[in-house]
Image: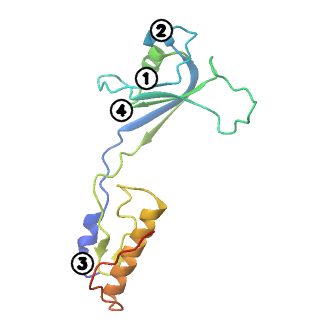
């Protein structure tokens, strides 16, 4: 490869910052100054001093119309997002019952913005994926890469911008 600058296009990942805990349990409504009769389905916070970012109730994916699934009680499934792993005593502040606690780390989205042209004859179709993720932007990225490769290979000289409507 003539140009090693393609290495600079590598994604830089920030260390794991998003952690989720999935669990079955009963949300402790009193923690949020609510009565047990209030059906709380999600909690989103902007206070960075709290140990969690969001708590949400998960509905079953195989739910059929007319079928009952738990809307209250210890069989509800919850997902808790946090910056650091929450220990059982911390989770017990928010839940009166806990079962089946599982934890998973998620990578922070990439911080770098890759270029379409990584090196001569090497293009990255999804260079705008960080900004807009859709089939239309992928199609435009593909078209952009094809035009650059045709120019690199000397098969087509692009002298003016091409305007296409999707």
- Height in image: 42 above or below 1? above
| Residue 52 horizontal/vertical position (percent) | 39, 26
Are circles 2 and 3 on residues that touch, CB within 8 Å?
no
Secondary structure of the residue carrying tag 3 is: loop
Sequence-first disc among 1 and 3: 3
Q: Residue at x 63, y 22 (%)?
A: 71
| Residue 44: quarter of image | top left
Marks 1 and 4 sit apart, C-alpha to C-alpha, by: 12 Å
In the rendered image, which residue does mark 3 sit on? 3
Q: Is residue 61 left or right of residue 43?
A: right
Which is in the foreground here, disc 4 or disc 2?
2
Which is in the foreground here, disc 2 or disc 3?
2
In the rendered image, which residue does mark 4 sit on? 83
Marks 2 and 3 sit apart, C-alpha to C-alpha, by: 62 Å
Sequence-first disc among 2 and 3: 3
Q: Residue at x 42, y 35 (%)?
A: 19
Marks 4 and 3 sit apart, C-alpha to C-alpha, by: 39 Å
State the residue in front, 17 or 87.
17
Q: Is residue 154 left or right of residue 101?
A: left
- Could you say which disc has been placed on residue 30 in the image? 2
In the rendered image, which residue does mark 1 sit on? 87
């Amino acid at each position: 490869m003539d140009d090693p600058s393609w290495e600079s296009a590598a994604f830089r990942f920030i260390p794991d910052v998003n952690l989720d805990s999935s669990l079955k349990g009963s949300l402790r409504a009193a923690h949020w100054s609510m009565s047990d009769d209030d059906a709380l389905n999600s909690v989103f916070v902007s206070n960075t001093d709290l140990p969690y970012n969001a708590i949400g109730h998960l509905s079953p994916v195989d739910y059929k119309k007319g079928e009952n699934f738990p809307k209250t009680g210890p069989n509800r499934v919850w997902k808790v997002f946090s910056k650091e792993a929450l220990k059982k005593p911390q989770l017990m502040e928010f839940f009166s019952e806990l079962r089946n606690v599982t934890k998973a780390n998620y990578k922070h989205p990439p911080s770098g913005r890759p270029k379409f042209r990584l090196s001569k004859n090497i293009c990255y179709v999804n260079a705008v994926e960080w900004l807009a993720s859709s089939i239309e932007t992928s199609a435009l990225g593909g078209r952009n890469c094809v035009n650059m490769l045709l120019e690199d290979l000397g098969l087509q000289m692009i002298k003016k911008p091409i305007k296409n409507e999707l």
